Image (cartoon, helix red, strand yellow):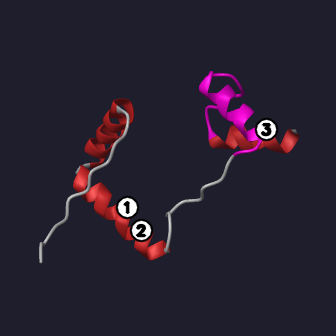
Amino acid sequence: MAKTATVHARLTPETKKEAEDILKTLGISISTAYELFYKQIIACGGIPFEMRIPNQATRQAMQEARDGKGEKYDTVDEMFQDMEVS
């Protein structure tokens, strides 16, 4: 029996590059990342993160954040103080 198996995946070049850059910064190889992901699938008995379709308000907030809109804070404490006042 083989000691390893090969996995082939198709993804956009942008996604691949961005993920590889992050993994490189973390000092983790792509193979190790795949192994970690697969082990988490096994440990969780499914995808190891929540998968939901965001509602309209969440989608709008996400788009505003991508567009650079919304409140910006220098510290987490400032953010929580603003939340308490609202």
On screen, residue 37 above or below 60: below
Q: Residue at x 25, y 50 (%)?
A: 30
How far across and down, in percent of the image, does residue 43 sit? 44, 75
Quadrant in the picture for residue 11: top left
Q: CA distance from mark 3 to mark 2?
A: 30 Å
How far across and down, in percent of the image, does residue 22 sit? 34, 41
- Amino acid type indicated by mark 3: Ala
On screen, residue 57 above or below 49: above
- 77 relative position to 13: left or right: right
Q: CA distance from mark 1 to mark 3?
A: 30 Å
Q: Residue at x 71, y 26 (%)?
A: 70
Give the residue at mark 1: 37
**Membership of 78 in magenta stretch:** no
Q: Residue furthest bottom?
A: 1
How far across and down, in percent of the image, does residue 56 sit? 78, 38
Give the residue at mark 3: 57
Residue 28 visible (yes or no):
no
- The quadrant the N terminus occupies is bottom left
Pointer 3 local density, CA inside 10 Å: few below 14, some 14–19, many at least 20 = few
* Nearer-the-camera pick, 20 or 72: 20
Pointer 1 local density, CA inside 10 Å: few below 14, some 14–19, many at least 20 = some
> Helix, strand, or loop for circle 3?
helix
> Helix, strand, or loop for circle 1?
helix
Q: Which mark is residue 17?
A: none
On screen, residue 68 above or below 53: above
Give the residue at mark 2: 40
* Magenta residues, start to end: 54-75
Question: Disc 3 vs disc 2: Cβ atoms closer than 8 Å?
Answer: no
Q: Residue at x 30, y 56 (%)?
A: 33
Quadrant in the picture for residue 34: bottom left
